[in-house]
Image (spheres, rainbow, N blue to C red):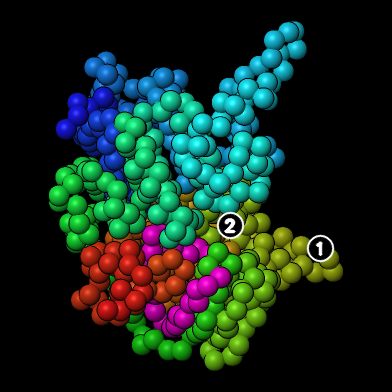
Amino acid sequence: MTTPFLTLTNIGKTYPGVTALAGVSFEIAPGEVVGLIGENGAGKSTMMKILGGVATPDSGTIEIDGTQHTALTVPQSMAARIAFVHQELNLFDNLDVAANIYIGREPKTGGPLRLIDRQKLRIMVHPLLERLKVDFGPRTPVADLSIAQRQMVEIAKALSLDARLIIMDEPTSSLTVSETERLLGVIEELKSHGVAVIYITHRLNEVEACADRVVCLRDGRLAGVLQRDEIEHDAMIRLMIGRDLKALYTPPARPPSRGAEIRGLVSSPFPDRAVDLDIQRGEILGLAGLVGSGRTELARTIFGIDPPLGGTVTLDGDPVTVSHPREAIAQGIYLVPEDRKQSGLIIEFPIRVNVTLADVEHYAERGLIRRRGETETAERQKKRLNIRAPSVETKVVTLSGGNQQKVVLAKWLSMQPSLMIFDEPTRGIDVGAKAEIYTVLRELADAGVAVLMISSDMEEVIGVSDRIAVMHEGQISGILTDRATFTEENVLELAVNAPAHAAA
């Protein structure tokens, strides 16, 4: 192998209550494609932040061209010619391709005004686009480009920095099969020019297609490394697993009964895919899948945030309309969103207001809010959920993540849920709060509520669910009904394969 130009040795990073990385070491050589795999929360993002100079490691060293660093700054990372293509593309729609590629680094004209030299800018961009064999030019407005074309603009931006290492984070999550093949061809081209790539993805077939080596992280530690001749689907899955997850499970207190039935439901990100799913009263149905598989989009469609393109939802056999959240709420369909601060709470308001906000008409009399009624409800939910705060007048912004999540739960539990959808219910909260939320989920199911729990935490899905449905690219790829089959291997197999493959 070519001599590595970048070596990470015993990198460690901790956040309050969380070990993000512990003693991780790996290296990368010119022209090498390294597939970086692992479950959500395994430490991949933290490692990339350290390489980009955004996060500072607590221990270990980073060696670049023989020079050791205890940490990198952003300028040092850029000087080392490390570039990123993020999953969320950072482009300006109101500018053209050339302006986006050289944003902040534009060539200037002479004279006192020092205006942007647009002609020179386009001349500089043209060879980058030719190298990538794209079908648009420097003057094309970014607003007119597809997601795949925008991805190429990001890669061109990295090449404009004369990058020798490009880190791609879930680069194909929004691409079609043909666009993915085009991207893999570009990676091969970069490799032939000596550019190294760290390819972060959950799509193991892509790793098999392009990686020279695979590095797997699990729970912040290096789980193993696979060389080119060892890279195959089952070997990667074996590296990604390794825990006994059944201790969290509490059996249901009642047999399941008819609840929500979803038939042919089509969400806008996947207009050619339909979802059929039964969410029974008395059960916790776990919904697993990889980033971009369509789980959150399904939840948003059921709750009426995004209008369905087709299909039906029935509750207890009766059809329900889900064209707006108000209609969903009126029929007892509630959503605990993935981003609680953005979508679940008004964080500058007190607990009392957040708890009663979704049912504020109930507390109104002649156009005025009955504050006493609000306070009684909020106090009751604060006690029920053990929300740790001085009073219900405490602003939500001052609470911990776990207590903020409990306030979101309190909002819905103060009403009459029939179907509760939890999207990543324990993301970013501590172990103790997680256990309390799992108890609430089970209590809801035992009270006859249909519970759908969307989670990227494999331990959570396997340890809490009565059944597990798995999504792959906008549709259900399989459902596990026997707890004896609840293994990470089986869930991952369904998550990384199309339904036809999984059924076979």
Q: Residue at x 58, y 57 (%)?
A: 344
Residue 404, percent from left and from top: 52, 52
Which amino acid, mark 2? Gly
Q: Residue at x 55, y 74 (%)?
A: 266
**Is 411 situated above or below 215?**
below
Distance from Cα at disc 1 to Cα at disc 2: 24 Å
66 or 2, nearer to the observer: 2
Residue that badge 1 annotates: 368
Query: Can residue 356 be seen here?
Result: yes
Q: Which corner quadrant of the image does residue 186 belong to? A: top left
Residue that badge 2 annotates: 344
Residue 413, percent from left and from top: 54, 69
Residue 427, percent from left and from top: 42, 53
Magenta segment boundaries in residue numbering: 271-297
**In this rendering, would 311 be left or right of 16?**
right
Q: Residue at x 51, y 84 (%)?
A: 263
**Is 441 situated above or below 80?**
below
Mark 1, mark 2: which one is toward the viewer? Answer: 2
